[in-house]
Amino acid sequence: MKVIIAKDYAEVSKLAADVVEKVVRENPTCTLGLATGSSPVGMYKELARRCKEENLDFSKIHSVNLDEYVGLDGTHDQSYRYFMDSNLFDHINIDKANTYVAKGVGNVDDNLKEFNEVLDKADIALQVLGVGPDGHLGFNEPGEFLHDKAHKEVLDESTIDANARFFASRDDVPRYAVTMGMGNIMRAQKLLMVVSGNKQDAMKQLLMTEKIDTKCPATFLRAHRDVVVVLEKALADEIGYKG
Ligand code: GLP
């Protein structure tokens, strides 16, 4: 695991964008696994700038996203389809027909079948990840066991709390989501975790223990052979991580 400590959020975004850029330049027809959340927003902005100003070419790139809320249509401003369009896809030269975000409305079983078919075919060159304060990846919530493939999850109360800031009220936060499973994430060729915000507990468990624990899904990164974690110095200092 390569851990990069950046001086601030702007530098986190640039260094994370460097990792994505390298993969895209080396393999301009690859599939990227993408993530939502506030952490990768700066990285997406930087990638959009590099696309416009530095000819970073996404025209033949495919993408598949980690997760989507159950109950939100892609036109809902808190859906992850809407997030991806407004934060990245509308600002780069990707063909939106080549981007996949699981459907949040309609029959959940049918949506999961489609999501799993897409994942079975995809060979993800780089999977971008954020991390929840409780260590969740995508919406793989801490628990007694984790899932291999795409599935429906009941969101933890702590995840509903963490994501309530994006909705008019806590009651508006969906209670369910569909998400890639841990197996899908672990099968990506390379993982890039972009860390920002109150992630002390998850980072302590990932960076400062030896455990791989289903109660902190982020710890599974330790079992992957090609991982880059980018975090801010302030967070590293707070948890006493020296690198
Ligand atoms: C949501 C997403 C996760 C994301 C997490 C952290 O729960 N499903 O994929 O990693 O939020 O978000 P943020 O980056 O805003 O802290």
Image (spheres, helix red, strand yellow):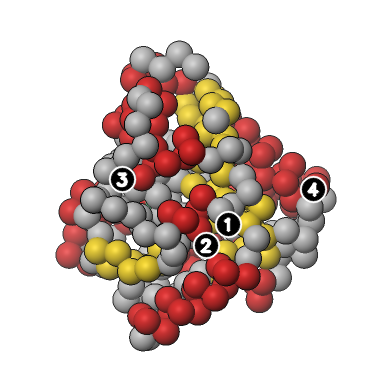
Query: Which residue occupies 57% across, 69% down?
Result: 120
**Label 1: which residue?**
33
Whole-number angstrom distance, CA of label 4 to CA of label 1: 16 Å
Q: Secondary structure at mark 1?
A: strand
Binning the other alpha carbons within 10 Å of mark 4 as few (below 14), some (14 to 19) or many (20 upward) gives some
Q: Is residue 81 left or right of residue 46?
A: left
Amino acid at the residue labelled 2: Asn
Mark 3 vs mark 2, foreground winner is 3
**Label 3: which residue?**
214
Residue 49 in the image: above or below residue 31: above
Q: Quadrant of residue 146?
A: bottom left
- Whether tag 4 and tag 2 are in contact, CB under 8 A, the answer is no
Whole-number angstrom distance, CA of label 4 to CA of label 2: 20 Å
Binning the other alpha carbons within 10 Å of mark 2 as few (below 14), some (14 to 19) or many (20 upward) gives many
Binning the other alpha carbons within 10 Å of mark 1 as few (below 14), some (14 to 19) or many (20 upward) gives many
Q: Could you say which is closer to the camera, residue 33 or residue 187?
A: 187
**Label 2: which residue?**
65
Q: Is residue 32 left or right of residue 210?
A: right
Whole-number angstrom distance, CA of label 3 to CA of label 2: 22 Å
Query: Which residue occupies 58% across, 57% down?
Result: 33
Is the residue marked 3 within 8 Å of ligand 1, measured from its CB? no
Query: Which residue occupies 38% across, 26% down?
Result: 210
Q: Is residue 25 left or right of residue 116?
A: right
Amino acid at the residue labelled 1: Gly
Amino acid at the residue labelled 3: Thr
Q: Position of residue 220 (x, y in %)?
A: 42, 41
| Sequence order check, earlier mark of 4 and 2 | 4
| Sequence order check, earlier mark of 1 and 3 | 1
